[in-house]
Amino acid sequence: MDWWRAKSRLFFWCLMSFVVGVALSYFFRIDGFVIFCMILASALGLIFCWANKRLVIAILLIFSFGLGFWRYQIALPNYADSNKIFYYNGQEVELQGVISAVDRRIDRQKLTVESRVLIIKKMNQGVSGKVLATVNLFPKYHYGDRVTMRCLLIKPDKMEDFDYGRYLSRYDIYSLCQRAEVRILSSGTNLSPREFIYSLVLLTGQKLGEALNRSVSEPEVAILQGMLFGNVRGISDDWNQKFSNLGITHIIAISGSHITIISSLIVTILIGLGISRKRAFWPAVALIIFYVVLSGAQVSAVRAAIMGVLILYAQRIGRLHFMENILAATVAMMLLVNPKMLLFDVGFQLSFAAVLGLVYVLPVAQKIFRNWPEGWQLKEMLLTTVSAQLATLPLLIFYFHKISWASLLANVLILPIIPFLMIWSLINSLVALISTTAGQVMGWISWLLVAYWLKVTDLLVLIPHGFINIEKFSWPVVIILYLLLIFLVRKLKNHYQV
């Protein structure tokens, strides 16, 4: 047990060193050759100093830190590379590429195009990199379409207080296509097996969404589309503002609770079919991945899916698993793929802050209020909500400049219906694919539950001073608040022997 705990702690701190390296590389620049030498020296040190445990631990931490530094720096764009499309920002260009994402809005479409060929003076030059183009709502474009575009390339810049360039950089987009003239060369017929499967899953999500549209009326169906399939574009600005004021936007965003509900449903069905929990692992993982892709592979969903799979695997092999290690591994895996998420993605930060609240704050809260009556799980729901909100509060105030005390009441009144609503609405979508009439009959219950949700929201936003605006809130204040929270949790943890 002690051996396993020691190895587990070393693993955790190595992962944290990697994350710290990624974070600090944003503020400090070190020459790539220096980082390479640091990583190489660490690797050699491990070989020649293996007998000295303390030295090995120090070397492993340095190695992990250097790896994080290196991973972020190689993710930065090299604007001097003429083989990258962003090298040509500021010029009128004609290029060919393949559509990798389509974001349909009410009055327009946003196309993410993976550039392949740049046409200059009737000469073709191979290029790579993503371009974001805004075009009319029609004709409709689809994932995998090969297109040619003529437009002015520009570098994304700040828009008032919003740094649009930094926001897009997390998707590796460094070029916007203005005045785009787009022509389809071929539909998505020449896809690789991976791309074909991905497009098939996206099509499935689209068909399920259309089936749900035939079963439930607006605005309720827009809420369901956002909660089930990650399509939040149909939710009006008015409702988005109300949800934001009440602090319940997280209920719509696909997150840990949604993935937990889906994975629990999948495992329950598989066990009901006679499959053992151990053998149900791989089908459950496949279906979780399917759902995450189907819902648009949002950061919160990917994070929740990785954590869920790691927990399922730990249970499958019967190993001890610590939530902090699973959380650290999830962060490190996601930053290894895209290190820019750590500082440029608000959703990423809020997701992990909420999970930290559940890992560290919730056990203390449960110990403090252990003698309180359960009350149909209301106590657990309230403690869970408070723990997550305490952990995200400094970030929420910093980014959104408001704090809502009515949020607690909103969560207690709405969260109990979410598991049943999700499961019922998913089944509703599947039934509606087969029979519109049967889907509409089931849709009455889906509509009723969301109507209750919206009515509660309408009533709570009318509470005087239900939320307070806080205009000035800087990063140093955020850091101080988190340090105070850590200090308080540690003191209470020791006092109550959690």
Image: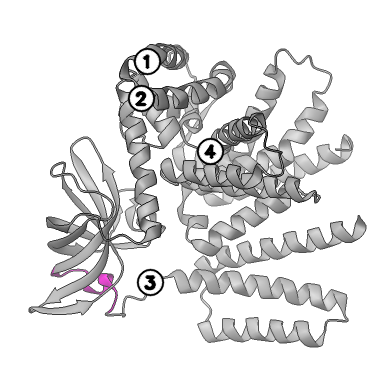
> Mark 2 sits on what residue?
434
Residue 241, can we see it?
Answer: no
Mark 2 residue element: helix
Task: Report crowding for label 3: few under 14, some 14 to 19, many 20 or more residues within 10 A (C-alpha).
Answer: some
For the residue pair 280 and 162, the one nearer the viewer reads as 280
Q: Nearer the viewer, mark 1 or mark 3?
A: 1
Task: Tell me if residue 34 comes above or below residue 298 in the rendering.
Answer: below
Label 1 to label 2: alpha-carbon separation: 8 Å
Tell me if label 1 and label 2 are in contact, CB under 8 Å.
Answer: yes
The residue shown at (49%, 21%) is 424
> Mark 3 sits on what residue?
77
Mark 3 residue element: loop
Task: Tell me if residue 117 comes above or below residue 318 in the rendering.
Answer: below
How is the model colour-coded?
one colour
Q: Amino acid at mark 1?
A: Ala
For the residue pair 394 and 146, the one nearer the viewer reads as 146
Residue 223 percent coordinates (x, y): 39, 25
Label 1 or label 4, whichever comes before in sequence order: 4
- Give the side of residue 490 with respect to residue 110, left or right: right
Q: Amino acid at mark 4?
A: Ser
Label 1 to label 3: alpha-carbon separation: 52 Å
> Mark 1 sits on what residue?
438
> Mark 4 sits on what residue?
255
Mark 4 residue element: loop
Q: Amino acid at mark 3?
A: Pro
Say if the magenta span includes residue 89.
yes
Tell me if label 1 and label 4 are in contact, CB under 8 Å.
Answer: no
Task: Tell me if residue 43 comes above or below residue 392 in the rendering.
Answer: below
Outermost residue, left side = 122
Q: Which residues are magenta?
A: 83-93
Residue 482 percent coordinates (x, y): 65, 46
